[in-house]
Amino acid sequence: MAYLLCLQAGAGIAIANLIGALLIGVLSMQAARWLKMPVINFNIPSMVPFVPGGQAYQMVKNFALGDNAEA
């Protein structure tokens, strides 16, 4: 959401990515402390939309969940 808001405000893609990634990092650390889980469990799935290949991730996820038609 922070990424989209920055883009709509005209901040540019690089700044929007930076702000989105920083927000994900801070919120991941808070969620990890609250749920007593490793931070990486929150970081990696949250960062996938920021990198090229997000559609490949969705395909692998759907195969893993057994939804071959959607994959």
Image: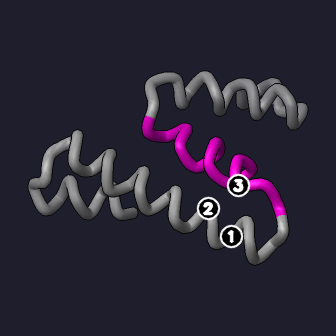
Secondary structure mostly seen in magenta is helix
- Position of residue 1 relative to residue 38, above or below, is below
Tag 2 residue: 28
State the CA–CA distance, disc 1 to disc 2.
5 Å
Residue 32 horizontal/vertical position (percent): 73, 65
Q: Please tell me which residue lies in front, 54 or 22.
A: 22
Earlier residue among tags 2 and 3: 2
**Are dots 2 and 3 in contact, CB under 8 Å?**
yes
State the CA–CA distance, disc 3 to disc 1.
8 Å
Q: Quadrant of residue 14?
A: top left
- Position of residue 18 relative to residue 65, above or below, is below
Residue 70 horizontal/vertical position (percent): 72, 31
Tag 1 residue: 31
State the CA–CA distance, disc 2 to disc 3.
6 Å
Question: Which residue is rendered at x = 22% and y = 41% of the image?
Answer: 13
Residue 42 in magenta?
yes
**Are dots 1 and 2 in contact, CB under 8 Å?**
yes
Quadrant assignment for the N terminus: bottom left
Q: Which residues are magenta?
A: 37-50
Tag of residue 39? 3
Question: Which residue is rendered at x = 84% and y = 69% of the image?
Answer: 36
Q: Tell me which amino acid carries mark 1.
A: Ala
SS for callout 2: helix
Q: Check the image and name the residue furthest to the right.
A: 66
Q: Residues within 10 Å of mark 3 (few under 14, many from 20)?
A: some
